[in-house]
């Protein structure tokens, strides 16, 4: 699969990007290069290859689940103009 210049223009419009003709051609080449690489990767035979969670065989260090920080919410919210149920109350800016 390869993209065309009109595809790049559509992607740029959807992304709200302003590209000149040189940039469009550069992006077209880069995107097609990425798609070619993906096609090459998909053609690799991976039969019998076990999925990995990490490229190195590393055991996770587990620790006891303990509370190490104290609750500072009241201290942090003391300077707020209005707080209810530990939530900051702000003025409504969007009308319904």
Image: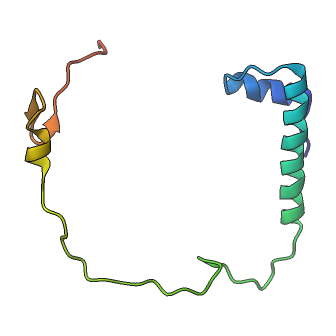
Residue at 20% from the left image edge and 76% from the top image edge: 66
User: Which colour scheme appears in the figure?
Assistant: rainbow
Residue 90: x and y in percent read 20, 24
Residue 59: x and y in percent read 49, 87
Residue at 78% from the left image edge and 25% from the top image edge: 10
Out of 20 and 31, give the one closest to the viewer: 20
Residue 91: x and y in percent read 20, 19
- Quarter of the image for the C terminus: give it: top left
Residue 39 as seen in the image, left or right of residue 90: right
Residue at 31% from the left image edge and 83% from the top image edge: 63
- In which quadrant of the rendered view does residue 38 lie? bottom right
- In which quadrant of the rendered view does residue 71 lie? bottom left
Residue 75: x and y in percent read 9, 45
Residue 35 as seen in the image, left or right of residue 70: right
Say above or below: 68 vs 50: above
Say above or below: 22 vs 68: above
- In which quadrant of the rendered view does residue 31 lie? top right
Residue 62 as seen in the image, left or right of residue 92: right
For the image shown, how many numbered marks are present on the structure?
Answer: 0
Residue at 85% from the left image edge and 49% from the top image edge: 35
Residue 66 as seen in the image, left or right of residue 33: left
Identify the residue at the far top of this view: 95
């Amino acid at each position: 699969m390869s993209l065309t210049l009109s595809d790049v223009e559509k992607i740029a419009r959807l992304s709200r990007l302003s590209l000149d003709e040189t940039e469009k051609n550069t992006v077209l080449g880069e995107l097609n290069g990425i798609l070619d690489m993906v096609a090459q990767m998909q053609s690799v035979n991976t039969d019998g290859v076990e999925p990995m969670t990490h490229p190195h065989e590393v055991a996770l260090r587990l620790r006891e689940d303990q509370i190490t920080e104290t609750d500072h919410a009241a201290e942090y919210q003391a300077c707020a103009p209005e707080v209810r149920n530990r939530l900051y109350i702000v003025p409504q800016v969007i009308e319904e």
